[in-house]
Image (cartoon, coloured by chain):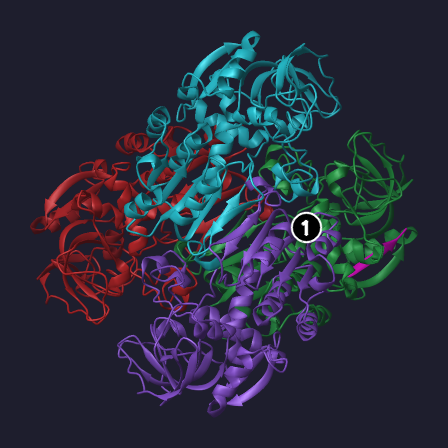
Chain colours: A red, B green, C cyan, D purple
């Protein structure tokens, strides 16, 4: 089969690999659609260290090709979605309820990290009974594929934000994850959602996904604007969807005492991430900082797919580009360079 | 009446003041016993800015001297304890459940901050119906006075720590608040409590209040020791009871993915408090950072007093010194300089 | 002033009363708009015992006429909404966070119960600082009045239902409270909402407020239908919005293991309310039964009003009738007899 | 191997069976110690229907005899404890966090229900990686065996009771589960624990495990006594540890508004379990009714074992009798008839 791999830091390409074999609890999925994620670019640049001929990708849906002998409740030929995070569900961290931290910090993240990813004609899924989510008939692959990471991660950002019914929420960064955090905040009862973003196309999508106001941080201090919008109190909840220290600090500044900062962004640089001491209430203002990694598992995936089935959520306005898998290198390059106003490119197999 | 005041930054003394008058919802309490808190020293040094002839103190118990016309459920002559934090209970932050953040960040802290404190022969209490807690007959003033801040703050540290039943807890700093955090963690179901402390007398008290092991950070890296004690995973919960950046960072390092860092310490220095990025799981390890300020209110005070009534908690081993109010200046100086192995000095009126 | 009162069980009328006087923490509101609630009918029939010349009503908005000497943050002339429940916020139950249970079970319910209600030209509000919510300029009285009880109670039903993101919810009974529970469930992230109702007009409104399917219990067993809709598992959450034992039992039957039954209905009859033992999993199926009474307070009211201000919620399709206060007896009679397809009658002052 | 079985309703005996075989995710444990549970008696009497030659027992510890090919992190020869509840951890209910309700209501209960139990020389454990908990060296089998059900179930009763720090708790029934609920409530921060029990030996044990007062319901109305002890308010939390309707109703009556009733008892009789309507606050008093089934899993078992390792909990005073497995029929009979003051009989293999 053909797989899109990272040969080494800075070098990608398509190569031939054998179709993987399932262990007793595993499955092999034949890929039908996938999305490219910015984090693949980070990986290729060396964010998690060097890798050799590692298959990239963690946002793919497909059809069950083979099932391990101990897998239950599934059958070959079913259309399935698989989360980017594929926990074992039986280690201590999983049993504690932190399945994304499977066996160790971020350990649920296996695709294109500690094993081959899902941007290939076939891919391997561990603990298949719990990780494969059947896709309802009415939901096309091109929609379902958004549950793998974008909806799952963005919505988690909103779930962790402890939004009071009718509360105010600021989302910093309206990339795909931030856009889904905006959508998630609306789904979870926010009264007002403010998106902080400067790119016009993303601003427009933020409004489409439910932002009541978009704040352009290039035109004024977004914290000042958020305080003005909330009678000087700050928002109930702030979601960091970028992974930048300055944005994180603004979240702390813009959140009211008793509020929650929900960090979703991957912080990739520096030895420290700083909390502004006074805005943090000298460590006493009841401001809570939550973090998390996209939760996986078929049960949650089923709930995300339900929003697509009923039409209540439609993430496809984010699909600005579409490529066949044969064009994957061009697709990756376009995404890597953020050319042509790209938000998310869909790959068809 | 006589009051122990801060004349200006760096200068304290006893002065004569009129006995305060109650508004319709207020009370005046005649003081019988008080404790001196290290934060009074910080205030005198200028931590919250300059103040002029401001009465110090926020850990006092006494007898109701006068009641405002609209106060209900109390009577003159009752023995009462008053928390260091005296919220209004009717502003928006109070209604949201964050009474320590009354009207604004840390706004529940009124004594010796925005109004005269409680180290005087009489003191004024706002919203008396909700802030005065009757002291049970069997509980002497010298015990009850620990509910005003030490037990309230230390136990809050444990309540915020999300300790799983049988979980592991590290308490950084075994001053009076840290000692009560140790006690609180035991009360709340911790399986193992580790106190990080180097002063022998505090180490001994930490064991007495329930620490299973005391880690001397002067003899080795406490994070390394905590990881060793927990099979390399880290503790379920870490409580910062000192207010130092290094200690806060160690809390993040020593806490396992999915665990909670409960900050109790007042962070008094620097523009920022840094989070170690990798130990924080690049913002994705489900490590939650909680903060808070000692919650007030008679209902909670009543629950704290119950532990004293039944004898389950006895904080008085922390009372290393005792002074009459006439010796308050000497008492303050001893505490300020941490002389003579002082932990908490009791002031008798 | 004129007030609409219950003279005694079974007898209502308009009578002249003096405009009430405010105590130091109180306010007097001049009424501008009100709704009649079915519970007024229950009261008149004797549900809470006899009352003499008690003013009815608990869903009124108006303009501040007078303020007590100790009230802060408000001014005469402001347009305000007042919740049906007006807690003191300083008793032990309030301090514990259960403000609806102020001083005793259901003790936050003061209007038309332990003091005169709000269906009069003026009405008295205790603890005004915390109970008066300013109405935003863009929100007309005829909308704001729905926050007093219908939105507050219905949304509480959804908040108590522990709805997982994308979860399934059944609402039993689509009267005004049930309709707002449907709306609340959608606001709080439900993936599917099923309303159980047989009256065509209410069925239509249920769809309008977000029900994905309406189940007519006169045409088949609703529990069977709910199990069919959920692969035999039952819904994640069921909301009882009627106050009938049979409906409550159906909630228990239709909820999956680990799910939540949120009771909102007032259960007015019988010595017992029965739980079906086997469907309850013999007391071991992790099915949680929550109950509650509409929470009051300006902070929450402010969040409800925000939904009206942004237009995200519009409850006025429930206003099927409108009367001047001079016609209050006719309005009450129409509501009492549920004539003319009435859902909620608006009273103008 | 020899197994103690239920031949059919009402008939038990020892029979020879083959040592079970492990599937890829399973383990076979050689039993070293076990406890007999009252629920075995219920089963034999037909509570869950007829069974033929079904091995009884669900409280056993032992040594790993064989491991399936896919099991990780364990080795043959390790001493292990296994919870009475052995979930799969990968079905939808498990993924939702309700592992006791594995696949269906109470579905985590497999031993001596849907498969052979653990009162045999060897027993089979599904999903071994997650269900086998290594026993620390310092903990003898005779102690560890209490984590299988008694500590796990009793402590769950306390965990579900939402006990405020320093709160009041009533435990109805001081059988082994109730005694562990008393112990659990003390571990989780209760200020006062009241045990309702009439059998002297159990009363004495209740005091030993931490009850501040024992209420003998044969000498007066226990609800009246609990109200007297709590200023007429009722307790914060009540734990039903018997499985009787009258006791359940008393829990509702004795719990204050805003409090929690935690049901642990198996309700074995009648079509309904009744809630007293007025004491339930007509369905509006914020009284929450939780239920549950003993949670399994090695991670939780590890936390329970930690209490035994540190000596903080010692359940062995409940071991009133000890028998070799060769005497299992006599042991069962003694337990079944509750003869000779028996609380729990330990079986040695």
Quadrant that contains the N terminus of chain C: top right
Q: Reply yes or no: does residue B345 show up in magenta.
A: yes
Mark 1 neighbour density, 10 Å: few (under 14) some (14–19) many (20 or more): many
The magenta segment is B344-349
Locate residue B150: give its quadrant: bottom right
Disc 1: which residue: D234
Q: Residue at x 55, y 83 (%)?
A: D334
Depth check: give the residue in front, D328 or D181: D328
Q: Is residue A120 left or right of residue C285?
A: left
Q: Residue at x 70, y 37 (%)?
A: C90
Q: Reply yes or no: does residue D96 show up in magenta.
A: no
Relative image position of residue B261 (x, y in whole percent) = 53, 57
Q: Residue at x 43, y 48 (%)?
A: C252
Locate residue D202: give its quadrant: bottom right
Relative to D211, residue B134 above or below: above
- Label the magenta part by its dominant secondary structure: strand
Relative to C266, residue A104 above or below: below
Residue A321 in view (yes/no): yes
Question: Element under label 1?
Answer: loop
Relative image position of residue B311 (x, y in whole percent) = 77, 64
Q: Is residue C188 left or right of residue C228?
A: right
Q: How many marks?
A: 1
Q: What subunit carries mark 1?
A: D
Residue B226 in view (yes/no): no
């Amino acid at each position: 089969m053909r797989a899109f791999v990272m040969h080494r830091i800075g070098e990608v390409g398509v190569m031939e690999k054998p179709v993987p074999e399932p262990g007793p609890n595993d499955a092999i999925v034949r890929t039908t659609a996938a999305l490219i994620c910015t984090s693949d670019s980070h990986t290729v640049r060396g964010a998690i260290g060097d890798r050799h001929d590692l298959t990239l990708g963690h946002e793919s849906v497909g059809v069950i090709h083979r099932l391990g002998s101990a897998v239950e409740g599934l059958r070959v030929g079913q259309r399935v979605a698989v989360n980017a995070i594929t926990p074992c569900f039986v280690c201590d961290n999983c049993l504690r309820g932190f399945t994304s931290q499977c066996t160790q910090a971020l350990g649920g993240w296996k695709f294109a990290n500690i094993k081959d990813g899902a941007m290939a004609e076939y891919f391997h899924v561990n603990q298949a009974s719990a990780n494969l989510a059947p896709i309802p008939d009415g939901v096309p692959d091109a929609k379902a594929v958004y549950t793998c990471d974008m909806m799952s991660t963005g919505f988690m950002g909103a779930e962790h934000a402890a939004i009071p019914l009718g509360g105010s929420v600021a989302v910093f960064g309206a990339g795909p994850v931030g856009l889904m955090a905006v959508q998630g905040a609306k789904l979870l009862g926010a009264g007002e959602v403010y998106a902080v973003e400067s790119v016009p196309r993303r601003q427009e999508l933020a409004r489409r996904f439910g932002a009541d106001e978009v704040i352009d941080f290039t035109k004024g201090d977004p914290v000042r604007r958020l305080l003005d919008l909330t009678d000087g109190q700050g928002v109930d909840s702030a979601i960091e969807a970028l992974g930048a220290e300055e944005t994180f600090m603004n979240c702390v500044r813009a959140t009211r005492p008793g509020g929650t900062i929900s960090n979703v962004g991957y912080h990739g640089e520096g030895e420290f991430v700083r909390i502004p001491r006074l805005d943090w209430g000298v460590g006493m203002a009841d401001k809570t900082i939550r973090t998390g990694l996209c939760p996986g598992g078929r049960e949650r995936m089923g709930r995300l797919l339900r929003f697509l089935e009923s039409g209540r959520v439609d993430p496809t306005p984010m699909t600005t580009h579409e490529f066949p898998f044969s064009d994957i290198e061009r697709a990756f390059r376009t995404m890597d360079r953020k050319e042509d106003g790209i938000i998310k490119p869909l790959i068809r197999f």
